[in-house]
Image (cartoon, grey):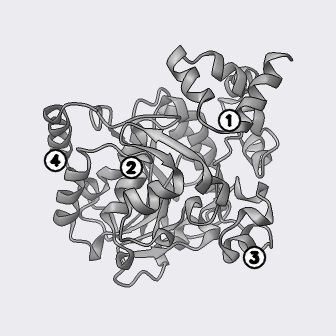
Amino acid sequence: MEGKEEKNNMVMKLQKMTPLIFREESLTPICLSCDANYEPHLWVTIASMIDSAKSKNKYHIYILDGGIKNQEVFFNLIKADNRFSIEFIDMRDQFVLAYESRHLSKAAYYRLAIFKLFKDYDRVIYLDADSYVLGDIAELMELPMGKKLISGAPDSITYEIPWREKNISYENYSGKALNYYQDYLLKDKPLKSYFSSGILVFNLKETDLEEKQSTLEKLLLNNYFSHDQDILNLLYDAEETLPLPREWNYFNSAPTLKPEDFANEEEKMNYLGGKVQPKIVSYVLKPWLKENINAPYANLYWEKMEQSPYYEEIKKMLKRNNKFDRFMKLNLKEKLKFLISGDINKYITFIKNLFR
């Protein structure tokens, strides 16, 4: 964990961020975080959003930018639809000491700057850069939030038994995932209220932004297994949170589960019973990884990616982006951690690829 003084400096940089200038009320403000690594996937997300937009209102996309290389590509993408505009917010100097692990980078933390950047806005929609939009995202501006301060869909830990049973480990905790979320992280807060940070609606009009910002700054001094998502869940209590309807954050991993893998009957019906049709797909199973080429809704991603200027780059990356190749790139410590993680499927996959 970084030193306290260094973390305090990170918080001070966040405090100095300049709020964005408020735009007209008829506008749908949409915020995404991205760096160069996710730039191609961001293109797919925005392209699908444009395809699905039905409102006559204006859509203004804010990119919290961690180093996108080709901004012009995105300006070209929106040219054909005058309802859309785009703005890049340079975030490269923010959250530089934020805790990173697994596939998550510092860009994931950028959404935590929303309290500072959008302080003059009533409502802001946030979505991850690896989403596929099938419904009109402007509908989220009409979500009946009342006095609720944030809306997010229940995370998979609230319903997925295999995820609950997995062993997780990081510097502050080692043990079963369920115990981390239920006992270590949330304590008195009900597990069912734990939400995913992939698609969020912030009701800033009803929020005490100074109070939330102050609490956020304290939380940033600690490291959490699920990074910014854990921080957001600690920022809002159950009474402040409105569950986002599942169709607005449809995990493409859940349809691959078995009926007995669900701890929640409603979510089992959502995914296996066809109760909902997705309006936004969250790519928990990343379509650009070789093992996920046939994952649910991966075909939509590839159909859209084929139209993008990034297609050849991602197609080449797919050929070498499989579990075994990624394992071989790990250092010795990371390889050992992978192999003693307790997930028998990892051993099976490793051995199969070793002798292919």
Q: Which mark is residue 228?
A: 2
Question: What amino acid is found at the position of numbered circle 1 in the picture?
Answer: Ser
Looking at the image, tell me whether mark 2 or mark 1 is earlier in sequence order: 2
306 sits left or right of 108 in the view: right
Q: Nearer the viewer, residue 289 or 299?
A: 289
Mark 3 or 1: in front is: 3
**Residue 177 can be seen in this image:** yes
Mark 1 or 4: in front is: 4
Spatial CA span between label 4 and label 2: 17 Å
Question: What amino acid is found at the position of numbered circle 3 in the picture?
Answer: Lys
Quadrant for the N terminus, please.
Answer: top left
Looking at the image, tell me whether mark 1 or mark 4 is earlier in sequence order: 4
- Proximity of marks 2 and 1: CB atoms separated by less than 8 Å: no
Question: Which element carries disc 1, helix, strand or loop?
Answer: loop
Spatial CA span between label 2 and label 1: 30 Å
Residue 66 horizontal/vertical position (percent): 39, 34
Residue at image x 66%, y 69%?
Answer: 263
Residue count near mark 1 (Cα–Cα under 10 Å), binned few <14, some 14–19, many ≥20: some
Quadrant for the C terminus, please.
Answer: top right
Residue count near mark 2 (Cα–Cα under 10 Å), binned few <14, some 14–19, many ≥20: many
Looking at the image, tell me whether mark 4 or mark 2 is earlier in sequence order: 4
Residue count near mark 4 (Cα–Cα under 10 Å), binned few <14, some 14–19, many ≥20: some
